[in-house]
Amino acid sequence: MSLGALRVGLAGLGTVGGGTWTVLNRNSDEIQRRAGRPINITAVADLDQAKAKALTSGKARVLNDAMALARDPEIDVVIELIGGYGFAKDFVLEAIRNAKHVVTANKALLAAHGNEIFAAARQRGVMVAFEAAVAGGIPIIKALREGLTANRIEWIAGIINGTTNFILSEMRDKGLPFEAVLKEAQRLGYAEADPTFDVEGVDAAHKATIISAIAFGVPMQFDRAHIEGISSLQAKDIAYAEQLGYRIKLLGITKRHADGIELRVHPTLISSKKLIANVEGAMNAVWVKGDAVGDTMYYGKGAGAEPTASAVIADLVDVARMLTADPANRVPYLAFQPDQMAALAVVPIAQVRSCYYLRLRVKDQPGVLADITRVLADGQISIDTFFQREPDEGMAETDVVLITHQCVEQDMQAAIARIEKLPTVLAKAVMLRMEAFV
Ligand code: HSE
């Protein structure tokens, strides 16, 4: 049986849009054999008309108003590659109102407004597919939503921002400070001119929010995520961690917790023996623990034209395959049936249990360690390991580095506040969380 072509409108012809056009054209025969019908981008919209015309060379209509795509009766599916949560949100909602299926790579939009978008899509009976929104070409949404559907997910930890993983790898390899590596990354085109969303952990938190919702069947709760980036991380701490057998990675973590779920992004010490600690450069990796399957890990490129296009086109094929299915029988947007979502809230970071790395700048004199360890003992915080650096030449001060056993964050924060008041402690403590992932 031969089915009519799926008519696609593509909004936004940047890096990913260009890659989507290229891959869909290059592999159109195989994609058609898989989808059961041709998938044709019949119209594109971009403000840069000349670029759009050059790319599509007469094979698609070129519009300068994306909203016209959202309303076009000749379009079945729109791909939103506009980015941001302003116009992109209006565009997606307008497409849904006009009964179009939507494929998007926009993690910021879904993390912030996904609940509203999915409600609108459900009401209109259309699909919203977003494989490209998390970890680029890695099919992590598919894995979580379908492949691991038998499991009770226990936790997920991901390197889900390539820019920061590249910066951390370079800082460790070359012993360079954050600012110097960021400048180099910008020069090489790995980091954006405004790198705030990447380096401050916001991009990773958008992605962690999405995988958390799918893993636990909870609404998007981006506004409750705990977010710390890497801009204040010092090369010294990366080196000390390494001496202790750990690497520091910016992880997006989501876990079950007795009172809800954890959702956090922060630099994290991980044993250098763990696979995820060895994911270097701009690569992404997502580690998922399910009760039945155990540990699974997904590794690949988290950005770039064709890796991200790979995910966008996979979504188009899913839409083509499910087009005629009763909406109630399609894979639910967030893996769980909409009326079966759990009301689990994200717990505040103060209630999270973790091990901690502390670096303290102290006077090098008798009794300093005793004072510090007394404060920790009073807080019922047990020390796992510590070392003291040789004092720098001619200086009567040094670094004390210690790692604690697990404790609740608010107890650690209280202990740090007391430690910082000791007259022999000379600067604000550096505190990093450490995860064993067992
Ligand atoms: N800016 C992201 C990163 C890629 O550095 O991984 C797009 O999500």
Image: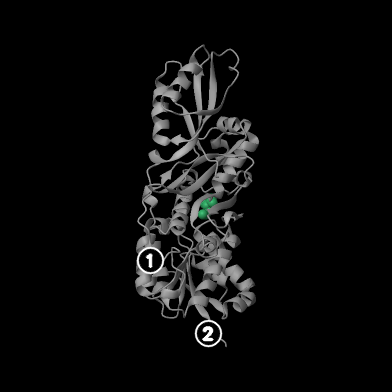
Q: Residue furthest bottom?
A: 1
Along the viewing direction, whichever of 314 and 298 lies nearer the viewer: 298
Q: Position of residue 162 (x, y in %)?
A: 56, 49
> 10 Å neighbourhood of mark 1: few (<14), some, or many (≥20)?
some
Q: Is residue 233 above or below residue 74?
A: above
Amino acid carrying label 2: it is Gly
Residue in the foreground of this view, choosing between 48 and 437? 437
Q: What label does residue 4 carry, if any? A: 2
Q: Secondary structure at mark 2?
A: loop
Name above or below for residue 22 compared with residue 293: below
Does label 2 or label 1 sit earlier along the sequence?
Answer: 2
Q: Which residue is mark 1?
A: 338
For residue 290, the mark is none
Mark 2 packing: few (<14 Cα in 10 Å), some, or many (20+)?
few
The C terminus - image quarter: top right
Quarter of the image for the N terminus: give it.
Answer: bottom right
Q: Is residue 124 visible?
A: yes
* Residue occupying the far front of the picture: 292
Q: Is residue 61 visible?
A: no
In which quarter of the view is residue 74 placed? bottom left
Instruction: Work out how far the residue at label 2 is from the one at label 1, CA to CA, in angstroms.
Output: 31 Å
Where disc 1 sits, the SS reads helix
Q: Nearer the viewer, residue 181 or 390?
A: 390
At which x and y percent is residue 93? 36, 67
* Amino acid type at image mark 1: Pro
| Residue found at x 47% / y 56% | 211
Q: Is the residue marked 1 within 8 Å of ligand 1, measured from its CB?
A: no
- Vertical order, 23 against 325 (above or below): above
Tell me residue 240's x, y (percent). 59, 30
- What colour scheme governs how the chains and residues are painted in the rendered image of this protein? one colour
